[in-house]
Image: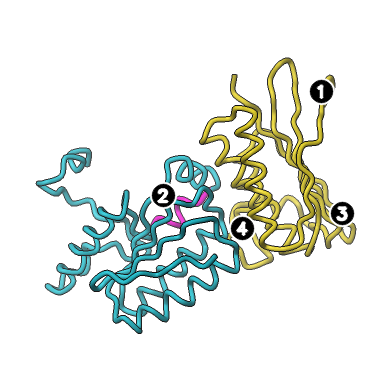
Chain colours: A yellow, B cyan
Amino acid sequence: MNGALITDEVNLKIASEADIVLARQQGRALAAKLGFNATEQALIATAISEVTRNIVQYAGQGTLKIEVESHEGVQAVVVIAQDNGPGIPDIARAMEDGYSTGGGLGLGLPGAKRLMNDFLICSETGKGTTVTMKKWKRS
Amino acid sequence: MVPPILKQGTCLMILPQSALTDADWRKLQEEALERVGKHRARGVIVDVSALDVLDSFACRVLRSLAIAINMRGAKTVIVGIQPEVAFSMAQLGLTLRLGGIATALDLEEGLDLLRRGLSDARQGRFERFAAPGRVAIKEKRPDCERCADY
């Protein structure tokens, strides 16, 4: 994030299924405001839906921040999903398609990674998980 | 909000008007299955054209809904997946998992698909209908311009 200008835009507490819908709607609205096209808005909203659902399902609660980053005149939506839940014991497996410990399709994390441009995951067992992902606006 | 379920002939139509929470999806699944029995429906259409996101949870619900409805003796068609939603689903990796479910462009095409599927079923030709695990109809219809693409 060197040389980046960061402004806090959205800061949400994620604690229920209704927050998943709210989070993706706010993410889409911000992306629209920045001039992302309809397809990119849908990609961002879907990725937010996946990572916030992980918070609700595995950690119970957490936070979602959506920021704007600028690098050499190109803007990006930065989504940071953070929780203090149980953490992910095996990140490599969690990033595999079809692997789920929660009865889902196992597409949440690997799918979100495909939907966005940059994807970073930090997790420590017993401490929590932070997913940071970015979508750059095609200029 | 749990979407309304409307009855149209032997079909049920589920028309979500706004974003559904996970709880709404679960409730919808229950209600749809119950209504299939209550109305003796032969087909169920889920029109998702008003939904701007179909994530992995929504797709999982749609898929199990279609399979369960099939077990109740009716067929399901998902219609109205918006272009950007379709693209997001493909990127997410949902294509293969939704592949067995019949889809159509819109309500009209969906009803047409069910009507043809149902009349064929009465004649004992079930195989034309897209069952879970099978790819949808590829037969050319003489009256349809788009069918030339096949």
Residue flagged by tag 3: what amino acid is it?
Glu
In the rendered structure, are the residues bearing label 1 and label 3 in contact, judged by CB atoms less than 8 Å apart?
A: no
List the single residue furthest toward the right: A127
Question: Does B42 appear above or below A35?
Answer: below
Mark 1 → mark 3, Cα distance in angstroms? 27 Å
Residue holding disc 3: A124
* Callout 4: chain: A
User: Could you say whether the residue bearing mark 1 is in a helix, strand or loop?
Assistant: loop
Q: Which of marks 3 and 4 is nearer the N terminus?
A: 4
Residue flagged by tag 2: what amino acid is it?
Ile
Left or right of A56: which side holds B113? Answer: left
Label 3 neighbourhood size at 10 Å, few (<14), some (14-19), many (20+)?
Answer: some
Left or right of A94: which side holds B80? Answer: left
Q: Which mark is residue A106?
A: 4
Residue flagged by tag 4: what amino acid is it?
Gly
Q: Which residue does the image show at 55% across and 56% down from the upper left?
A: B19
Residue holding disc 2: B81
Residue B97: in magenta span: yes
Mark 4 → mark 2, Cα distance in angstroms? 22 Å
Q: Nearer the viewer, mark 1 or mark 3?
A: 1
Q: What stretch is highlighted in magenta?
A: B93-99
Label 1 neighbourhood size at 10 Å, few (<14), some (14-19), many (20+)?
Answer: few
Discs 1, 3: same chain: yes
In the rendered structure, are the residues bearing label 4 and label 2 in contact, judged by CB atoms less than 8 Å apart?
A: no
Discs 3, 2: same chain: no
Discs 1, 4: same chain: yes
Q: Residue B62 carries which label?
A: none
Residue flagged by tag 1: what amino acid is it?
Ala
Residue holding disc 1: A4
